[in-house]
Image (spheres, helix red, strand yellow):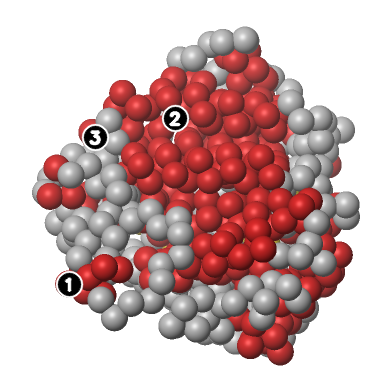
Amino acid sequence: MKNNICKLILACGLGLASFSSCSKYLDVDPKNKIPGDVVLTDPNGVKAFLANLYFQAPIEDHVYFPREGFNARGNTGFLSLAQYGMEAIHSEWPNWNEYRNDWWEKGYRLNRSINILLETIPALAIAQSEKDLLMGEAYFLRAYTYFGLAKYYGGVPIIDKNQEYSTDFESLKVPRNTEKETWDFVLASCDEAIAKLPDNHGSTDVSKRRATKWAAYALKSRAALHAASLAKYGPQAPLSGEAVTQKLVGLEPSEANRYYRICIEASQKLMESNILALHKATPANRSEAIKAYQELFYNPASAYEEVIFLKGYSQVGNNISHDLDGWNGPNQTSEGFPHRGRTNPILELVDLYEDYDHPGEISPIATTAPGSGNNTTGYDPSVSYRHFDDPADIFAGRDARFFASVIYPNATWKGQQIVIQGGVVRPDGSLMDSRGSYTHEGVTYYTYGKQQPNQYSGFDGSADMTRTGFLMRKFLNEGGRYNTWLQSTTDYVDMRYAEVLLNYAEAVVESGIDENGSKAKATEALNAVRFRAGHSVAVPLNLANVLRERTVELAFENKGYWDLIRRRTFHTVFKNKVKQALIPLMDLRGSNPQYIFVRKNVPGAQVQNFPERDYYRPIPNVAGNGAVQNPQH
């Protein structure tokens, strides 16, 4: 049976389509539960049932979109968490922040299936080792399910046994547990998984796609850090109402260090495992650092020493493929996919990538001459700008992760120089920033760098063009060709060793715990992540360094949004916030045409605010389920 499950997950990447023929095994009889002798005594039934549970887990991967929910494919628009936070903006819908609030229903549907599995396993006619493996995976999936529920809703009903169907619907209603009880249940489920899961599943590839002891530790590290942050920083965004009074939302500040300690201990188990390492941790040069970091995401199989848990994709054209590459490649290199260029990194993120010459310092992109200040309101003819023959030169010396994560003006992609330009400064100092051309000394210059739309990739206002001056490179496969839907099969790395190191460093800094040399270890962990990016100078362990490192290391991995949530900074960062762009202009005022750059609000972007009530999502259907609603919803 174990081999059959392994083969399914290895071959199918946990895809639902691959076991559609086994749908009879997946249908839950609403009058009771699936009898064990129908499903779980049959190897094919076990593998289909288990694969379906993995498929439903709330992994915010290449097919998760806030307005569409999990496992969304087709014309989703590719609105991502990175665009909702402080990493990017959407090229077509720069002001969209709608959410599909459906994890409550889906989470409890998945939890019911997990409870069925847990109740049925003891009676199976299989070896105890196989029972332990199945139970370990079920506990891991339960922990992940409730982690999703807790971070969306706070305290939720803990249902750890299958509910028998009854016409007395009132007897089926379960009140919400406190938020503390919910987070403790997540962590306890991780512990149950750790106790039963193996170190590996034999095959390295399968071991990254199925839960292992190490994946459970990584989930515990992530969940404990989230809970600790809520306890420490929750008072910065106080809420009121019945849910607060009953402690259904909110954690006591006194709980913070308990959760930080749990994070430290779980992370340390991974750090001492001797089976995990950063991929190419000591690059010979910056070029090697760029290549190593980039391949970690477009080819995770090359970096299994760092990967702890991933969601696999393996076959084009169905539910085990996706459209990441089609939606996000530059307009110029489109091979026929109907949409492109949707994820536009914002200037605020780009500014956080360090300059190698100033380690440990924030070095915003310098657009003006020394002493002129960094004007942020767009082009001003009276300002003394820095000039460049090649627009890429303004980024020289930046962190390797910038070049591996972002397509910038004049970057090379698929053998082409990516043209990103937002205007032309005429010799008299006036700006041409709408579509047009200008001839100077016998040469014709175009507003967007080239004449035809298929020759450039930015700023003309259409949906396929960047509106920030940047495009996302991370995850994209430069060697692939994407001319229709569902052609991408890049796996999604959900948990990796670098995140664990940064979790550990943050927990040590925030808690002040210094036992068994934890501060020295945290300093080493922080700098190990930096050294992999080509840095050679260690920086001190402090919160600013940890958070900056976390932002650039985990950019576009759907972690930054939740960092704003758990640290309760969303409402302060997004207080009358307008995201920023970096716009290259061709300047014809000098003796030789050169590029200048201007900082400006993203064209079309509106002021954004984050209401504090949105730290928790509304509980759906409270009239029917009797749950206490979250504050101000």
Q: Is residue 469 above or below residue 533?
A: below
Q: Is residue 66 above or below residue 286?
A: below
Q: Label 2, on which residue?
A: 259
User: Mark 2 to mark 1: distance in Å?
Assistant: 34 Å
The label shown at residue 236 is 3
Amino acid carrying label 2: it is: Tyr
Asked if residue 275 lies left or right of residue 471, the reply is: right
Q: Label 1, on which residue?
A: 623
Image coordinates of residue 356 in percent, x first then y, are 66, 29
Q: Residue furthest left?
A: 241
Q: What secondary structure is found at the residue carrying circle 3?
A: helix
Q: Quadrant of residue 218?
A: top right
Image point (33%, 33%), residue name? 231
User: Mark 3 to mark 1: distance in Å?
Assistant: 31 Å
- Tags 3 and 1 in contact by the CB under 8 Å rule? no
Asked if residue 156 lies left or right of residue 538, the reply is: left
The image quadrant where one finds the C terminus is: bottom left
Amino acid carrying label 3: it is: Gln
The label shown at residue 360 is none
Image point (80%, 56%), residue name? 127
Choose between 533 and 453: the one closer to the eye: 533
Amino acid carrying label 1: it is: Ala
